[in-house]
């Protein structure tokens, strides 16, 4: 994995870029996504999602203003689908939507002169860099930063003191932080944002106007009806494939999501976690034993063992 104090970067080839240009771009996107696009500027990025009318996950992406356009750092494999979905809503809006993934690279950056929590409270803070933009991860500052750069500018990161790391190392860091990675961890048209950390990770603006899927999302929050939670898990044994059923004493306790080595993410039933705290059986997925961890963005303070759910 990547050390919090080692300045490292990893090119995230799994990420793509979709750009929105035109006089109506900001208002157009504002009516579709969970976060407040009014907050987005060249100095501030946000993480947000598009939902179905039933409040289920469709896409998630980071949004930053760059060169007069709204730039979406999204899942590369589904960038074309995102463009089609946005175009479906376009109607007569003055907005041009394009897939610019070939021209730009998304890079994950980890490491500061302080510890991994040094960037907390600066989530989304952005600035120009190397012909592109760099911004603190809007979900959780301890995860580091992201950069959207012209592909030929990646070498400038080395000149800035960053060492290149494998994408798998960044992925392990992401998993430890408990951060979902698009459709690897979120099932389109099935996952609910309130069960996957979107509120705690700053993806939902509760004081903005209407957006697609708002009613059910708000209802789940105010009625506290979420029955599951996405958490990092330690894996003892062979890593279960995504979608593997997780059981506790033979009963359904959740479902496995992505993993890397001995760390992964799992969507777990809250009642199963409560049972573990009172001496119930552990979690099993295939032949592996799983131990749920409290992600650092939920952590109340330092100290050994405080990253476990309680």
Image (cartoon, rainbow, N blue to C red):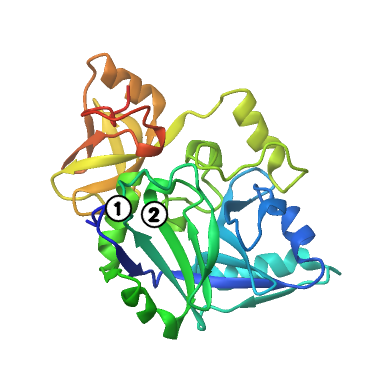
Seen from the viewer's position, the closer of residues 54 and 157 is: 157
Q: Position of residue 199 (x, y in %)?
A: 55, 38
Indicate the quadrant where residue 169 lies. bottom left
Q: What residue sits right under mark 1 in the picture?
A: 173
Q: Position of residue 46 (x, y in %)?
A: 58, 53
Q: Secondary structure at mark 1?
A: helix
Query: What residue is shown with label 2?
Result: 144
Q: Is 105 above or below relative to 145? A: below
First in sequence, mark 2 or 1: give its number. Answer: 2
**Taking 264 as reference, is 212 left or right?**
right
- Asked whether disc 2 touches disc 1, contact meaning CB atoms under 8 Å apart, the reply is yes
Q: Local crowd at mark 2 within 10 Å, few (<14), some, or many (≥20)?
A: many
Q: Residue at x 33, y 55 (%)?
A: 112
Viewer-side residue, 50 vs 96: 96
Q: Along the line of sight, which residue is nearer the eye, 301 or 269? A: 301
Left-right relation of 156 to 276? right
Report the disc number at residue 238.
none
Residue 15 to residue 268: above or below: below
């Amino acid at each position: 994995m990547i050390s919090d104090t080692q300045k490292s970067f990893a090119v995230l080839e799994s990420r793509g870029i979709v750009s929105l240009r035109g006089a109506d771009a900001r208002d157009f996107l504002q009516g579709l996504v969970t976060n407040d696009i009014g907050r987005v500027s060249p100095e501030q990025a946000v993480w947000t999602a598009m939902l179905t009318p039933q409040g289920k996950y469709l896409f998630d992406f980071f949004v930053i203003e760059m060169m007069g356009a709204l730039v979406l750092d999204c899942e590369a494999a589904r960038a074309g689908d995102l463009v089609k979905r946005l175009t479906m809503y376009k109607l007569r809006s003055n907005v041009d939507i394009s897939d610019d993934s070939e021209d730009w690279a998304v890079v994950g950056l980890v490491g500061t002169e302080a510890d991994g929590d040094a960037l907390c409270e600066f989530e989304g803070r952005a600035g120009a860099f190397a012909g592109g933009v760099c911004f603190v991860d809007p979900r959780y500052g301890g995860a580091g930063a992201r950069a959207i750069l012209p592909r030929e500018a990646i070498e400038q990161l080395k000149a800035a003191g960053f060492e290149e790391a494998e994408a798998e190392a960044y992925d392990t860091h992401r998993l430890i932080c408990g951060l979902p990675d698009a459709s690897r961890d979120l099932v389109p048209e099935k996952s609910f944002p309130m069960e996957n950390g979107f509120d705690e990770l700053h993806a939902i603006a509760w004081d903005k106007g209407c957006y697609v899927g708002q009613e059910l999302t708000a209802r789940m929050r105010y009625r506290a009806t979420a029955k599951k939670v996405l958490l990092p898990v330690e894996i003892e044994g062979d890593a279960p494939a995504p979608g593997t059923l997780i059981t506790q004493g033979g009963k359904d306790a959740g479902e496995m999501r992505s993993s890397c080595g001995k760390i992964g993410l799992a969507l777990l039933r809250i009642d199963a976690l409560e049972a573990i705290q009172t001496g119930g059986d552990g979690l099993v997925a295939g032949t592996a034993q799983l131990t749920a961890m409290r992600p650092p963005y939920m952590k109340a303070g330092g100290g050994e063992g405080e990253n476990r759910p309680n």
